[in-house]
Image (spheres, rainbow, N blue to C red):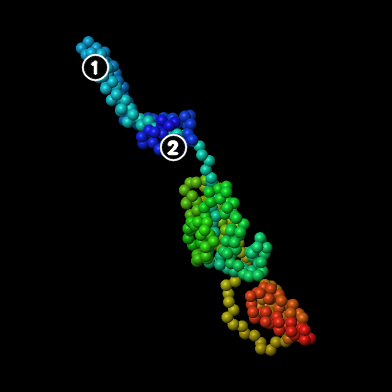
Amino acid sequence: MSLLSNLPGLDPNAFAGARWSDISIRWVGLPTAVEGGWWSLATLALVMFLIWHAVREYRREGAVISAGVRRLLTALRLGAPGVALVILFQPTLVIDRSERLKSTAWLLVDDSLSMGIEERGAWGMEHGVRSRERAVSRLEGVKSLVTRHSLLAALAATHQLRLAAFSDGWREVTTNDVVKLTPRGTATSPANGLRQTIENSRGAPLAAVVMVTDGQATDGETAAAAQFAAQRGAPVFAVGVGNPKAPKNIEVASVTANPVLFKDEARRLSQKALELAPDSAAYLDTLAEIHLRLGQPVRAVEFQKQAVELEPESLDLAERLKKFEAAAKGK
């Protein structure tokens, strides 16, 4: 094997680990009927004629030329067709070897603006425990799960892992870039993200395409893109994040109401509002204030403590809790 690796024009590393049974010579220029190489066949006929001519001349010149000169002339006459054969049929040294390549696994992360919506109690802050301490955006929750649970390392252990961010565009990112993603896209197009991913795979075998998104698609091409992926044998796994309910994007600018309100009616309306938004610290604070005015400071303390648990960083809620506790003790 060392003899072959020392031949000029050959890469010595190409023979690393190769056996003699893996090496062969293939005549890549050999004409076939499929290729329609009529000119090669004509050249081959010419070469055969030259060989016949060399043999005939060798016999004819035997009476007038010495044996040594005759052999030299014959060698030259046969050498010319030999060179022609080499040029014509292009003998190529081929090394056959098999290598197991890792299939590619893609992780696509939605970085559209809707992924910036903050939700309370949706993401685990420590070891998968649901947190009601503070609101966390959908994208921050995804980044936390990806890094905390070693998802990237697990995928990279068995596959060639590639990552990309998508929304109104598509771009491949590195592992370090994932934790730096911020909501930026003005639209969400899972279809375009899926197509771009498959096209950028360049024919490599795909083990899976994992698409993490809040599902707020703004185009109608998702089904067509899924079919496009299926035709190319790419398994797609969609991981939905966030609240399945549509986000509220309406703000109350003003409210007109009767200035006269009975105390008990205020409590009823406040409880109704809390049923619609049970995690609203503001609604709990309002209900606590109503109970205080109804002469029920103990109940006021109960609701105010719930409000403080939802927003422990609020100094205003904490001060009001002290006020209600003082009223409860005074009573």
Asked if residue 265 shows in the view, the reply is no
Figure quadrant of residue 318: bottom right
- Residue 253 lies, in percent from the top left, at 58, 80
Identify the residue at image location x=66%, y=69%. Answer: 132
Residue 28 bears which disc, if any?
Answer: none
Identify the residue at image location x=71%, y=78%. Answer: 304
- Residue 184 lies, in percent from the top left, at 50, 66
Quadrant location, the C terminus: bottom right
Tell me: residue 316, above or below residue 114. Answer: below
Residue sitting nearer the eye, 219 or 248: 248
Figure quadrant of residue 280: bottom right
Mark 2 lies on a secondary structure that is helix
Sequence-wise first label, 1 or 2 = 2
Instruction: Quickly name the residue at label 2.
Output: 14
Which residue is at the far right?
331
- Residue 312 lies, in percent from the top left, at 66, 74
Which residue is at the far left?
64
Mark 1 lies on a secondary structure that is helix
Figure quadrant of residue 278: bottom right
Amino acid type, residue under disc 1 in the picture: Val
- Residue 160 lies, in percent from the top left, at 53, 49
Residue sitting nearer the eye, 8 or 40: 8
Quadrant location, the N terminus: top left
Instruction: Quickly name the residue at label 1.
Output: 69
Decide if residue 234 is on the left or right side of residue 305: left
Amino acid type, residue under disc 2 in the picture: Ala
